[in-house]
């Protein structure tokens, strides 16, 4: 059974239709890499999956929870669907540990001590054990993004959404973040990533989704799709990115 | 609530209320013009004038900003005659409002002047402009553009504050409302109507000032 | 007729000043509480709540405080309740203060980057939790200076309570003036006392603002 099931989702901002009937099935352990031109609707799709945007038609089921609709249980949904943003969005008034502990203590009502142990564990996983008590502003971009990943992991999500999480980073900091994501993939975490890192999409992804004009234009196993793109649009896109 | 609101009983007094409203509008218009003139002079003096003049301006600004308008009004209307300066209610009201807005606009305009880059002044001087020309065409022009919204809000605040001049019997809208209330005892109705008139006036003034700003600063 | 010495006048004014301070404190604290509730409504994203707060703010910022005092004074009486100047002044000043504080604080909340809302949303925090743990702690740092600055307006605003008969500093001044016929002295002293109350607050607000700008 699919962990995330997207069926014919349509989404408009006013007049502009951004998603024109998107369908996608994501099974447990999948690493789905979404690629596509700027404006093709990648971020919008991701944001729909955890209810940051509403959509007008179709359905999204994540971990069995219906996302859309008036009475959607977004709180329950978001406990199981984590998200990492391009701009990190760490809470600047909280230390690294507090950033990671916040949702655990507030949402899950985990005792402070236990939450801190979890924080230590996930921060170790992203290689930032020694930064527990640092402030976000004292960290490099790559470190901040790794804290953001740890912050999501602390909720033990069933699926993690990543929207161009290396795009705001200096080139030399990209790899440290990608290595963390790769490690998560190896451990079996279900990931849906929007990315411009084509090599990463090919090497780490289990599924590739090429979005074009608000639709899933082509999809398949990354290595095969990259080796032999079927549609002219993807051929052009792949050629344009130099792979 | 068993009480029935009786707005009809205000009708016979419509002319009194209208006169009050007109007085309030004129009072606001005149003291706005005079107050901004005072503020411009104050801000220029404080930024470019001699030290002692700046100190006087600062004292004036702080004294006014840190005391209630009603006390300023009473001081001018009741206090000054004791020192030999007699003023009519209307003159005292105009004077108090001007002095009050003058202090606030000094502070607002000064902030605008300080935001003008030094290089612009040098550029003006290098174009052989005199001190006055630089002040008028370069500094104040830019300063006003910047602080226009803040100044607009202050004008509305002063307009609303003018209700207090009724307390020295200057015949503004609030005075008229008091008068009507003393005749027909429909206190709540009169004050509600007056409040709505002020509200309308405030909203109108805001959009007028916004439109005016677009016309004046249309360049850029 | 009673003879009033300078010290009599001053001590009477200072006694009345206590009521100015009490009224200011009550208006500021109650106005702050109401303002905080309104702030939650104002930025909730729930259209009817936002419209209500916008209307509320428009009314209390767009009409004279004096009119609000009159409306409360005569309005409550319509319900058959005995109104004291004290009650009318407290209510009017509270609502008036809350409108301004809500608007000031909304500006501070709006200056928090949208990403903070999104990140906390994605971590399953509810709206109230987002405000409590993420938005308000950040917004309140920016809000301190303008809030202190507005407290000066509250102190000055209490002077209008004199018009509906509440005996505070300004009313005491008027009464002493009627008794002594020394308006220049009396109103100078009244102004001076207000200045001593307000100037430290203005000064503090300016310092706080400066500190914040340096910190950035
Ligand atoms: N809040 C919004 N209001 C109006 N239009 C929006 C909004 N968010 C996105 N859009 C529009 O929707 C379209 C798709 O945006 P989206 O961010 O999903 O694209 P994307 O594929 O993620 O692009 P990029 O690679 O640049 O991030 C764009 O045309 C964008 O301008
Ligand atoms: Mg995007």
Image (tube, coloured by chain):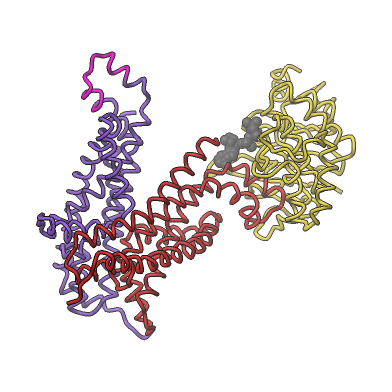
Chain colours: A yellow, B purple, C red
Magenta span main SS: helix
**Residue at the location (16% across, 67% down)?**
C181
Magenta region, residue range? B122-136
The correct choice, above or below, for B47 with respect to A2 in the image is: above
Horizontal relation, residue A62 to residue B208: left or right: right
In the rendered view, tell whether residue A184 sits above or below residue C186: above
Ligand 1 shown in quarter: top right
Task: Give the residue displayed 76% in from the left and 48% down from the top.
Answer: A101
Q: Residue furthest right?
A: A187
Seen in the image, is C105 located left or right of residue B173?
Answer: right
**Residue B195 appears anywhere in the view:** no
Of residues B4 and B64, the one drawn nearer to the viewer in this rendering: B64
Relative to residue B115, is residue B5 depicted above or below? below
How many numbered marks does the figure carry? 0
> Quadrant of residue C98 in the image?
bottom left
Image coords of residue C120 (percent x, y)? 67, 48
Judge by depth and name the residue closer to the eye, B93 or A27.
Answer: B93
Q: Is residue B133 magenta?
A: yes
Q: Is residue B188 magenta?
A: no
Location of residue C156 by image quarter: bottom left
Q: Position of residue C73 (x, y in %)?
A: 33, 74
Rendering coords of residue C85 (x, y %) = 34, 75
Query: Residue A43 at x, y = what percent?
Result: 67, 37
Residue C18 makes an appearance in the image: yes
The residue under the point 74% across, 25% down is: A173
Is B27 on the left-hand or right-hand side of B126?
left
Q: Nearer the viewer, residue B125 or B212?
A: B125
Q: Quadrant of the C terminus of chain A?
A: top right
């Amino acid at each position: 059974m699919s962990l995330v099931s997207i069926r014919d989702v349509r989404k408009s901002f006013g007049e502009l239709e951004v998603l024109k009937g998107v369908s996608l099935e994501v099974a447990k352990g999948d690493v789905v890499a979404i690629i596509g031109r700027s404006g093709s609707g990648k971020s919008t799709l991701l944001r729909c999956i955890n209810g940051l945007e509403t959509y007008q038609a179709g359905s999204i089921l994540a971990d069995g929870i219906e996302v859309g609709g008036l009475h959607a249980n977004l709180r329950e949904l978001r406990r199981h669907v984590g998200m990492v943003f391009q701009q990190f969005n760490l809470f600047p008034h909280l230390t690294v540990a507090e950033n990671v502990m916040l949702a655990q203590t507030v949402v899950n009502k985990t005792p402070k001590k236990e939450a801190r142990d979890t924080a230590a564990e996930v921060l170790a996983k992203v290689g930032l054990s020694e930064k527990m008590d640092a402030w976000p502003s004292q960290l490099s971009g790559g470190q901040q993004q790794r804290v953001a990943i740890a912050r999501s992991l602390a909720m033990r999500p069933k699926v993690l959404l990543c929207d161009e999480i290396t795009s705001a980073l200096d080139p030399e900091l990209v790899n440290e973040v990608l290595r963390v994501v790769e490690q998560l993939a190896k451990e079996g975490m279900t990931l849906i990533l929007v990315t411009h890192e084509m090599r990463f999409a090919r090497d780490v992804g289990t599924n590739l989704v090429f979005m074009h004009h608000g639709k899933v234009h082509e999809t398949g196993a990354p290595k095969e799709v990259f080796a032999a793109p079927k549609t002219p649009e993807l051929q052009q896109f792949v050629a344009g990115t130099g792979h | 609530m068993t009480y029935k609101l009786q707005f009809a009983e205000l009708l016979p007094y419509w002319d009194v209320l209208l006169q009050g409203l007109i007085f309030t509008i004129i009072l606001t218009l005149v003291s706005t013009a005079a107050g901004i003139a005072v503020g411009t002079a104050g801000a220029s003096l404080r930024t470019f004038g001699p030290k002692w003049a700046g100190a006087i301006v600062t004292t004036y600004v702080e004294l006014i900003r840190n005391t209630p308008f009603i006390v300023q009004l009473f001081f001018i209307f009741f206090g000054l005659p004791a020192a030999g300066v007699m003023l009519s209610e209307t003159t005292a009201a105009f004077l108090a409002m001007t002095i009050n807005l003058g202090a606030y606009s000094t502070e607002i305009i000064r902030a605008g002047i300080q935001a003008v880059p030094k290089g612009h002044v040098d550029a003006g001087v290098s174009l052989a402009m005199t001190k006055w020309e630089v002040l008028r065409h370069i500094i104040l022009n830019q300063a006003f553009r910047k602080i226009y919204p803040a100044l607009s809000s202050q004008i509305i605040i002063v307009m609303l504050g003018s209700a207090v001049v009724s307390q020295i019997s200057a015949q503004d809208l609030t005075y008229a409302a008091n008068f009507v209330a003393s005749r027909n005892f429909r206190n709540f109705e009169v004050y509600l109507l007056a409040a709505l008139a002020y509200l309308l006036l405030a909203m109108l003034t805001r959009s007028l000032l916004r439109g005016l700003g677009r016309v004046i600063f249309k360049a850029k | 007729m009673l003879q009033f010495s300078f010290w009599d006048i001053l001590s009477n004014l200072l006694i009345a000043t206590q009521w100015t301070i009490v009224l200011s404190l009550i208006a500021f604290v109650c106005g702050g509480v109401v303002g905080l509730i309104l702030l939650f409504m104002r930025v909730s994203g729930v259209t009817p709540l936002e419209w209500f707060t916008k209307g509320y703010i428009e009314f209390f910022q767009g009409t004279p405080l004096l009119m609000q005092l009159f409306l409360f004074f005569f309005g409550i009486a319509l319900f058959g309740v005995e109104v004291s100047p004290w009650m009318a002044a407290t209510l009017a000043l509270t609502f008036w203060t809350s409108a301004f504080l809500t608007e000031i604080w909304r500006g501070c909340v709006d200056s928090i980057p949208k990403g903070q809302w999104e990140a906390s949303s994605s971590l399953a925090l509810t709206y109230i939790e987002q405000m409590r743990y993420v938005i308000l702690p950040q917004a309140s740092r920016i809000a301190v200076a303008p809030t202190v600055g507005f407290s000066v307006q509250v102190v000055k605003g209490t002077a209008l309570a004199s018009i509906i008969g509440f005996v505070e500093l300004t009313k005491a001044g008027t009464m002493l003036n009627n008794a002594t016929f020394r308006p220049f002295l009396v109103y100078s002293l009244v102004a001076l006392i207000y200045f001593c109350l307000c100037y430290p607050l203005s000064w503090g607000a300016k310092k706080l603002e400066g500190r914040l700008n340096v910190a950035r």
